[in-house]
Image: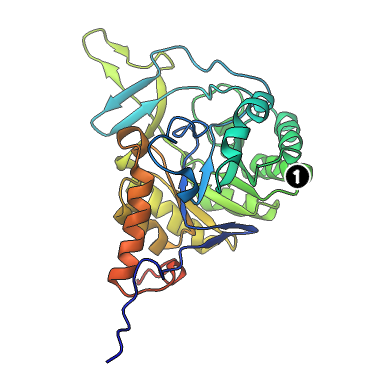
Amino acid sequence: MTDNTIDSRRVKMGVNIGRLFLKNPVMTASGTFGYGEEYSPFFDLSRLGAVVVKGLSLRPRAGNPPPRIIETPSGMLNAIGLQNVGVEAFISEKLHFLRQFDVKVIANIFGETIEEYQKISAILAQAEGVHAIEVNISCPNVKKGGVAFGTDPAVAASVTKAVAAETDLPVIVKLTPNVTDITQIALAVENAGADALSLINTLTGMSVDIESRRPHLANITGGLSGPALKPVALRMVWQVVRAVKIPVIGIGGIMTASDALEFLIAGAQAVQIGTANFINPLATMDVLNGLEDYLVRHNIEDISEVIGSLRT
């Protein structure tokens, strides 16, 4: 009698994000994984599908004043304000560390003007070891740029077109959920030349200290992340997958392999793990191992058989 069951060594985990091939669909979410150094003592970064680094601006940014993180019963609120070392320091001081791993590196970028997006993209296009650009048009915690670029289809398209003109690298555009109809933004960005989309960024929220009657965050409002986001993110991913032809990367409250499977079944080509990294530095590996176990348990050879398999 022939044994037709498969084991984890035979399952195929590779996925294509447009022109970008990943060995598996598990990525880190920007702003939750630094530039990889802090997590490297816990596991081999080469096991990841991709590392999405902390958002990069043209010049270094100090971010917002503290307090800028508060944990709520519904998830984490942050108003970091895109603190980062700047694109030049990233290339000269951080990128060499990531080059030692067999992992795709995706540079998340942010600008206060469309011209800044262009300049950052042109600089990164010349950097060895950057495999794609994720364009952040969705941060709710900065006064200039950020979500302002991501809520108007025409402006979102202009940013996308400007970035794509400066680089041959795949361009992934990260969308905000703080809009009336996310599919309008997704379609505008797709038509402007995006290779893929990632969604969602945080939902805007706030928290109040009832004793002082003051907001917990110095910025007053912040971005809510964590498990509370998952049903909203899953719904938006499902909507966008049905509206566009380019690949979609699912983000939002993914804590376990089961969470990731929900996004993949809904049609996401890959997933990004964010807030879970702060609770469990091995969260990405737990998700990856759980996905492989799921394929083995269901006798599925290729993760592609799971992607978009939602039955309605």
Please name whichever residue, 189 or 306, is drawn nearer the observer in this view of the structure. 306
In the figure, residue 11 lies in which quadrant?
A: bottom left
Q: In the current view of this chain or complex, which residue is farthest to the top?
A: 212
Tell me the quadrant of the picture where the C terminus can be found: bottom left
* Badge 1 element: loop
The residue under the point 69% across, 39% down is: 159
Instruction: Bin the neighbour count of mark 1 within 10 Å (Cα to Cα): few under 14, some 14-19, many 20 and up.
Output: some
- Specify whether 281 is left or right of 40: left
Vertical relation: 181 (above or below) 276 = below
Q: How far across and how far down the image is residue 99, in percent?
A: 61, 40
Tell me the quadrant of the picture where the N terminus can be found: bottom left
Q: How far across and how far down the image is residue 9, in percent?
A: 39, 67
Residue occupied by mark 1: 167
The residue under the point 40% across, 70% down is: 309
- Specify whether 118 is left or right of 308: right
- Specify whether 168 is left or right of 222: right
In the figure, residue 127 lies in which quadrant?
A: top right
Q: In this orientation, does residue 103 appear?
A: yes
Q: In the current view of this chain or complex, which residue is farthest to the bottom?
A: 1
The residue under the point 30% across, 49% down is: 256
